[in-house]
Image (tube, coloured by chain):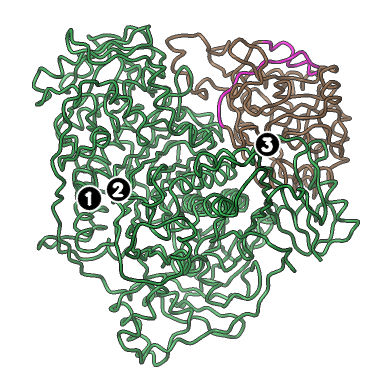
Chain colours: A brown, B green
Amino acid sequence: MMKPKVCILRSDGTNCDEELFYAFEKFDALPEYVHVNELREKSKNLSNYQILALPGGFSYGDDIAAGKVLAIELTSFLKWQIQDFIKNKGIVLGICNGFQTLVRTGLLPFNNLGKMDVTLAPNDSGHFECRWVKIKADKSPCVFLNGLTHPIEVAVNHGEGKFYTDEKTLKKIEKQNLVIYRYIDNKNKPTQKYPANPNGSSNAIAGICDPTGRILGLMPHPEKFVDITQHPNWRRWKYNSDGAPARQSLGDGGAFFENMIKFANQS
Amino acid sequence: MIHTIRVISKNETDPKGQNLLAEIKSTLNINSIKKIRTAKVYRLEGISKKDLKKIIDSALVEKIDQKYSVDEPIFNSSSKNIEVAYKSGVMNPEVASILKTTVDLNIKLAAADSSFEYAFFGTLSKDQLQKIINRLLVNETVEHIVSKKPKTLLISGKTPKVQIVPIRNLTDSQLLDLSTNRLFLNLEEMKVIQNYFKKENRDPSDCEIEVLAQTWSEHCTHKTFKANLTIDGKKKKPLFERIKSTAGNNNKIIVSAFHDNSGVIDFYDGWAINGKGETHNSPSAIEPYGGAMTGSGGVFRDIAATGKGAKVICSTDIFCFAPPDLPNNKIPPGCLPPLYLLKKVVAGVRDYGNRVGIPTNNGSVHFHEDFRAKPTVAVGSYGLIPKKHAKKKAPNVNDLIITIGGATGRDGIHGATFASGEMTHQTGEVLGSSVQIGNAIEEKRILDVVITLRNENLIRAVTDCGAGGYSSAIGEMGETVGAKVQLDNVPLKYTGLAPWEIFLSESQERLILAIDSKNIKKVQKICKLYNVQISILGKFDGSKKLSVRYKNQIVCDMPMKFIHDGLPQRNMIGKSRKNKLSEKLPKQPKNLLSIWQKILTHPNVASKEPIVRMYDHNVQGTSALHPFGGENLDAPNDAVVLRPILNKKYGFITAHGLNPILNRIDPYWGSIWAIVEAVSNYVAVGGDLKNASLIDNFIWPFPDSESLASLDKSVDACVDVAKVLKMTFVSGKDSLSSTYRYPEGPGLIESETLRVERRSPRTDGKVLKIPPVLLISVFGKIPNIEKTASSDFKKVGSAIVSVGKSDFKNLGGSTYFDVMNSTSNKVPQIDLKVLPKTLKSITKGIQSEQILSAHDISEGGMATTLFEMCLGGQVGAQIDLSKLTRQGVSLTGRPDFILFSETAGTFLVEVESEKIAKRIFRGVPHQIIGKTQKEKLININRGKNKLASASIQSLKNDWQKPMMEIFK
């Protein structure tokens, strides 16, 4: 089986690229760092990859709005490359700043490149949040996540992650089942309560996909928990397995990447 | 023509406004404001109507949740509106991104700026508004209130000519006048300069004088640490020499010590790790947000610019402030309120470190009233570097001098000399230009590009432009070779800088590289890929001179030897003074619980979680021991463990220790405490000291006779402990300017009067010595991160063991005494003979996985340690102190002294059984003090005597309250 090639897109201020690279590599994909300038000057081309991954960070300082300047760069210079990539059934993943960027390009949730339908606004707390939260996958067109119904623990690290849109669009998103993850409380129910919902997102939405399920984005970081020792409490699980990831040796983010890579291979 | 665009959120949710309102209520007690709304303001100059619409639609406004106005107010007249912007010439980091995006959108634009407008709804008097502006909203050093639309955003000026400074005929007092507030050199040093130019038969240029003042500044050359000393009548070796002599204690681990921008030690598989601690106290005192940012930026670049380039993997932050609730009348003239300082420093660290993508995962905050004039803001950083690239070499003759990164402006002129001088109440105004705002993304770009250039073998040498700017960076790199610089090649932020300003400017985010000229094309190409600006400034020319030109003018022409070796070694005399606090011990308390609660709410002990949660401590995915852990992720750990190479099991550990109050009471034993606290934190997570090394930061008052003597004792303490533990110092820094002068008079002040005070020049008055701080950091390696421990109790029914030799008699300087208003000159005496055995037993117990959890005993004493372990485990504990009070371990037998003694080098640990405890702590002082229990209660007894009992939840509420109130 060929390993799927992953374009890890870098720009000025990208910073969760290395852990994302590691996660893809660990689950048998072939990640490669690609600077947005390399795509612009065409020394590298998206057509050589099966997955386009936009990592977390502060692209261009998150100036104006988080991910905005990169989103403008992508829609101004790489529109055709991206559209071809999507047409050819590539998978687009945005995590944290990558999600903010995808939303601001319009790719999420309706694959409207150049038109923004939803936003990720400043957290209700008014500041950056670095903590661990629980999320749960919803049934969505993102088929490779559908088997993963267990609640999982993930890190959030962001200042602008509040999912927000007008009521009509929100209804449309729910109707088309485009929500892939929601923040949940201790009883595993979607929650609006801080800090379980760390930013005040509408309907506790932590991540969404487009109707094809091939473009997806989320605020939490599955890539920061693909080894058990990345969790703050892995030492406790030696003595008490309550709360430990389903598969002891891996983190909760492991299955996310494993399934995505398998899916990329099949399609 | 300038267009002004104002953007606000459509609905009323406005976190920025809400936070400001909460702050106004809690700190200024103004309760009549109903609501605050904030608008983002953009100013665009030289843009067409069509392009204006385009940039608004595609970049500045998101119509889903925002609305806007163009060239008209966005708030109606029912509110009081204040717009706060950076002053012209202070770099606003957002502007570069706005300009980039206009280029991407194919829009023509001459200049841009951005700012915030605040609208206050409700009733608000003029005085109240002024108070809000002065205390919370505007820092006049870098910001101003926009009262009318600016005419232009473009800054330009005519470049002044090189000035000659006639120095040869000056009298002694004229020489000193020249030095005061500009050069900060003493008469002897001024005379050396005068004599040199007499011999040269010419007068120096302004630049030459500035280069010498910078190179010879305390900040850059550490004159005190290199001086010959006579302390209390005895001749002693220079401080620096003594610290460096610790290299012999554990030579094997050192790759490079006191030679480069940071200290480097061995890691695994051909890798090395490097570490450095820096302080940024003076800038942070007058502009805390920018000061903290540029402090972080500087130390990151020190790490990155070590050897041929390192990757930055960790950031630490240690602060000392006056208590946040210090009454206004106690704040000295010219100083900012401590709450403002605390919040702004935290925000600066957050906004810089998070953006650069470096995990901030270790630190602490200390409070004492005597930091009211000047805080201590210490930032540490660590890196990973291939060992083969870890040693710094001099450039070859004919290597090119390259600068990469940010453009140069009039930022931070005189930063090096400023940091070396005492602060006065005038400092804020006279030297305001020393402070600047950092641009984190510029920093990130250069950190990224350096790694790529290093991997391609394109760097001969690299160094950071910190204090002293190009003067320092090029002067140091070219010390043995000589350098020829053409200043017109320096990219400038705006025109009008004098040549000496270009050379000395401390604009942030710049590096100097030595590059083999045959590689220049490759280097330029890589820099272009990373959007990094690069310029060739000249070459290392083999002349052994520093020659600088601007167009045809000679700006500087001096031999490197005079610049670097011309400074005479100082002879300094110190005399120690005995501290005479009255011996006032607390009465044996009837209610131990209420004291315990008070201690937990003491700001030095209280939880700092709200601060840590705003720092990204998890970026890079490397954390293997997070700052907080335990069942509810709210219990603090002692150190940070990282796995810097994600597919390897070996790890990096760092920890730190300090105690300014003990330092002041007893410079020797207080310093011993700081080092022992640092290594105890390191060992408590499973670190092995033979694979670790030390970093010192001395933050001391101006070295007058008394402070010099206490500094000498502190250095002795460092050397003594290092010897006992067979450890070595590899890096260090001193900042000897913790003295503040201000005019006599009643303690004033509301900020209005404060600003008046700043203007009246007076030199008489009071002197405030800030408590001396010895900050010790430890960093090192561990073969397997899986053999490390956290502080949370793991099981019910485990044995709780106190390990190490405690001093239950001397509690001078403890939190307990502070809470009780007690004083004593007797600080904890740490038994240095027992210490190494204690530490080894902990390391071994953790690495053999027999210790389930461990936590060191420090501020707040054993009672605090126990509470934090229970909190993490969500278990209770049944404790019996009778063994500790009996067996002669405690001379007083007082349970309050046992529970609240702060002896560094002692621990609480959890093991499965008494039997295991006996085995692993054979030969080490230890006592089994109790057991963990399911019921979430801590019961402390002496035999049948109940001393205190409390639920974990109620103690937690006390402990979390202080910082939660400040950081909502």
Chain containing mark 3: A
Q: Secondary structure at mark 1?
A: helix
Q: Amino acid at mark 1?
A: Ser
Queried whether the magenta region covers residue B235, the answer comes back as: no
Task: Identify the mark nearer the N-term, 1 or 2.
Answer: 1
**Tally of numbered tags:** 3
Q: Nearer the viewer, mark 3 or mark 2?
A: 3
Query: Disc 1 and disc 2: Cα gap in Å?
Result: 8 Å
Queried whether the magenta region covers residue A134, the answer comes back as: yes
Residue A211 in the image: state x and y as whole percent. 85, 22
**Residue at 39% over, 57% down:** B748
Q: Which residues are magenta?
A: A130-149
Query: Which label belongs to residue B774?
Result: 2
Query: Disc 3 and disc 1: Cα gap in Å?
Result: 47 Å
Q: Say whether residue A50 is left or right of residue B89.
A: right
Query: Which label belongs to residue A122?
Result: 3
Chain containing mark 2: B
Chain containing mark 1: B
As rendered, which of B629 and B452 lies closer to the eye? B629
Q: Amino acid at mark 3?
A: Pro
As rendered, which of B847 and A215 lies closer to the eye? A215
Residue B343 in the image: state x and y as whole percent. 50, 44
| Marks 3 & 2 on one chain | no
Is residue B308 at least partly visible in the picture? no
Check disc 2: other Cα within 10 Å, few if <14, some if 14-19, many if 20+.
Answer: many
Q: Secondary structure at mark 3?
A: loop
Q: Say whether residue B962 is left or right of residue A123.
A: left
Looking at the rendering, in which quadrant would you find the C terminus of chain B?
A: top right
Label 1–label 2 contact, CB within 8 A: yes
Residue B583 in the image: state x and y as whole percent. 13, 40
For mark 1, what is the residue? B714
